[in-house]
C-alpha cells in the first residue's frame, strides 16, 4: 500500500467512523474515483436516511442512526453490515476491492491476540483493514490500518481528528492495542 495515496482531507464530524473507514478504503482502491463524501451521500440516497439538514454533521448523524438501528434490528455486527453491503454492491464499490477476511465478536469482547499477529502478517502482503477498538469510556471507534512497503512500516488513517493527533500516522497499531472486529480488504486481481 502507498500511504501517500490515502485521502487525508476528509474528517468525520458525526458518529460515522465505521462507514467513514469503509469509504476511506474504497477511495484508496478506486484511485480516488469514489470520493468519501460521495459515498456518504450515496448511503443517504440508498437508505433514504432523511438528514435533518444539509450540514455534514446532520448527514453523518442520519447515517449513524440508520446504521445502528438496522444492525440492531437484523442482529448484525457493524462490520458484518459493511461486508454484506459491499458484497451486494449497494454503493457501487464491489469492483474495486474484496473483503478477504472478517472477524467479529458478538459479545463486544477483544479478539484473541492471534488475530493481531495474523492481520499484521497479512497487511505486510497488501490490503487495508478497518478495525474496531475500544477507545476509552466504553466508546468504540473504527480506523483504517495498512502497511507501506515503500516507507517500511505500518500506518493508521483515523477518520476523526483528535486533538494533537494527525489523521495519518506511522505506527503499528496492532502491536499494542486490542481489537474487537476487523475486515481486511484487498484489491481485486484482474485477469487479462
Image (cartoon, rainbow, N blue to C red):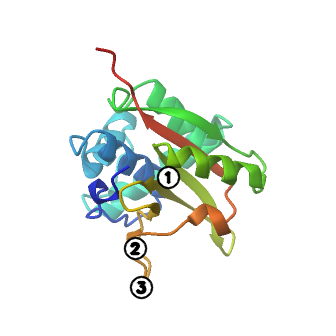
Q: Residues within 10 Å of mark 3 (few under 14, many from 20)?
A: few
Mark 1 element type: helix
Q: Nearer the viewer, residue 94 or 184?
A: 184
Q: Which residue is mark 3?
A: 164
User: Residue 107: x, y in percent?
Assistant: 78, 50
Residue 183 appearing in the image:
yes
Mark 2 element type: loop
Q: Nearer the viewer, mark 2 or mark 3?
A: 3
> Would residue 148 be found to the left or right of residue 122 on screen?
left
Of pointers 2 and 1, the one earlier in the residue sequence: 1
Q: Nearer the viewer, residue 91 or 150?
A: 150
Quarter where residue 150 is shown? bottom left
Q: Which residue is mark 2?
A: 161
Q: Quadrant of the C terminus?
A: top left
CA gap, disc 2 and disc 1 = 15 Å
Of pointers 1 and 3, the one earlier in the residue sequence: 1
Q: Which residue is mark 1?
A: 18
Q: Residue at x 39, y 26 (%)?
A: 89
Q: Residues within 10 Å of mark 2 (few under 14, many from 20)?
A: some
Q: Residue at x 44, y 65 (%)?
A: 158
Query: In the rendered picture of this protein, how many numbered marks are placed on residues?
Result: 3
Amino acid at each position: 500500500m502507498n500511504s501517500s495515496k490515502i485521502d487525508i482531507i476528509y474528517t468525520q464530524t458525526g458518529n460515522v467512523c465505521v462507514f467513514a473507514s469503509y469509504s476511506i478504503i474504497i477511495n484508496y482502491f478506486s484511485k480516488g474515483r469514489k470520493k468519501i463524501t460521495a459515498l456518504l451521500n450515496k448511503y443517504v440516497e440508498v437508505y433514504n436516511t432523511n438528514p435533518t439538514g444539509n450540514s455534514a454533521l446532520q448527514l453523518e448523524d442520519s447515517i449513524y442512526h440508520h446504521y445502528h438501528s438496522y444492525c440492531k434490528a437484523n442482529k448484525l455486527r457493524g462490520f458484518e453490515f459493511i461486508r454484506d453491503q459491499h458484497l451486494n454492491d449497494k454503493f457501487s464499490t464491489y469492483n474495486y476491492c474484496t473483503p478477504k477476511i472478517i472477524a467479529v465478536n458478538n459479545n463486544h469482547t477483544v479478539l484473541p491476540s492471534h488475530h493481531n499477529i495474523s492481520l499484521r502478517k497479512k497487511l505486510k502482503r497488501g490490503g487495508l483493514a478497518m478495525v474496531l477498538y475500544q477507545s476509552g469510556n466504553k466508546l468504540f471507534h473504527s480506523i483504517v490500518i495498512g502497511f507501506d512497503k515503500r516507507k517500511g512500516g505500518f500506518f493508521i488513517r483515523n477518520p476523526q481528528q483528535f486533538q494533537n493527533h494527525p489523521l495519518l500516522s506511522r505506527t503499528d497499531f496492532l502491536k499494542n492495542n486490542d481489537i474487537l472486529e476487523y475486515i481486511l480488504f484487498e484489491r481485486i486481481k484482474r485477469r487479462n
